[in-house]
Amino acid sequence: MLDNGEAVTRRTEARSGEGSAFVLSRGVVMLFAVACGAAVANVYFSQPLLVTMGHDLAMSPALVGSVVTLTHVGYGLGLFFLVPLGDVADRRRLIVAQLLLLVVALAVVAAAHTAAILLAGMAAIGLLAVVTQTLVAFAASLAPPAGRGRVVGLVTSGVVIGILLARTASGLMADLAGWRSAYLASASLTALLALVMYRVLPRHSDAPPTTLRYGQLLRSTITLFARERLLRLRALFGLLIFAAFSTLWSSVALPLSEAPYFLSHSAIGALGLIGVAGALAATVAGRLNDRGLSRRTTGIALALLAASWLPLAFTRSSLWALVVGVILLDLAVQAVHVTNQTLIYALHPDAGSRLIGGYMVFYSIGSATGAIAATSLYTVAGWGAVCALGAAFSCLGLVLWAFTRHSTPDPYSSGCRPRRAASRLCWRPQP
């Protein structure tokens, strides 16, 4: 029987032949990666700037906290209401339009002189930053089936770098020229990317557009989730790994700012540079998926994720232990994330935006759950309890994989080894 990666790839090849007529060069893939990283970074820029924003606009602590909340609420709404449009609209026009609207939202935030305008602008930034997922789906649709995992991995590496460097970049720019400079710089870069995307991306997709009205489009997203077991399983993996990811990154600043370290905000933000190693996992995982090794990749990555919490538990006594734990955690999370996106996109390439948008809703739920639980737990039980929480999320993912792995056997272990990626059509009936 086929591995999930093999099964969905076979289905994709039957539908799409040899792939898009547009030649997806490495340079264009890197453009997708840069655009994804730049767009998603806007969601995280505010985190090291909250105190400064609050002082500048005379905001109460509760109101300052709502800056991050509204940004993520906007992002969650965009995943459901905007990303599915990629299946019915010209993706090139949709991407350029969203990038230009994002420029406006960034300019509003940069010029905000009241809390109300700032909060409205932050919600709009979150809503429009979901262009990242439209870019991922578009890149996947342009890639040949045999190389889709590699392309998704490369593009996702841009997302990883954008998320992890956003806090460092905004903190440095704020120190140099004030917090507004971070949003002005991002607006300028986004405008430039919109122009380049308009000139470089293909005007039309080879696949005929889905003839659904907007309401039908949204309902079909729910229908796909109810119908596709693989989508539900991978969405649950996504929820658990990003709950673990958020458990670390939403709370790690707390022990580092206390004894014995007393690290500055800039030093803590620089920790994101270590996490960029996760970008390597994204590209490697994509290549492994192209070879039909999705099940093994998922299992090994989840085991690493669970193991990462052991060195992380020694953060208070060793920064080296923290570094090792961060690298292991980010490598594991990105490997599973790329595998998830590669597999679910190939289920229905004509519904790629809806599939990825629906999957990313669970990413948002996991991220929010991890952040709220970790910060609350730290105040009452300390860093050890936070690590236990992260390990629990990770182990739940590993247990889920252990109980479901036999329903998705690896073709390599069954003696069906393809000679090349493009010929992955070997199939055996289930006994």
Image (tube, rainbow, N blue to C red):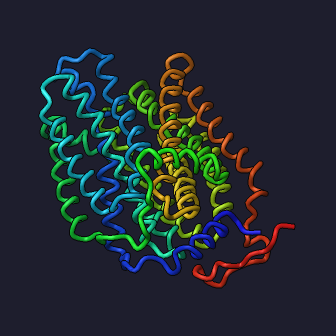
Residue drawn 47% across and 39% down? 364
Residue drawn 34% across and 44% down? 270
Q: Quadrant of residue 91?
A: bottom left
Residue 383: percent from left, percent from top: 54, 27
Q: Quadrant of residue 59?
A: top left
Label count reads: 0
Instruction: In the rendered view, tell whether residue 190 sits above or below residue 76.
Output: below
232 displayed left or right of 364: right
Instruction: In the rendered view, tell whether residue 91 sits above or below residue 396.
Output: below
341 displayed left or right of 54: right
110 displayed left or right of 42: left
Residue at the right extreme? 431
Residue at the bottom extreme? 419
Residue 35: percent from left, percent from top: 30, 58
Residue drawn 26% across and 32% down? 49
Residue 92: percent from left, percent from top: 30, 63
Instruction: In the rendered view, tell whether residue 206 sits above or below residue 376.
Output: below
Q: Quadrant of the N terminus?
A: bottom right
Q: Is residue 239 visible to the viewer in this orientation of the structure?
A: yes
Asked whether 184 or 263 is in front, the reply is 184
Q: Quadrant of the C terminus?
A: bottom right
Q: Is residue 316 visible to the viewer in this orientation of the structure?
A: no
Residue drawn 67% across and 68% down? 7
Asked whether 139 or 152 is in front, the reply is 139
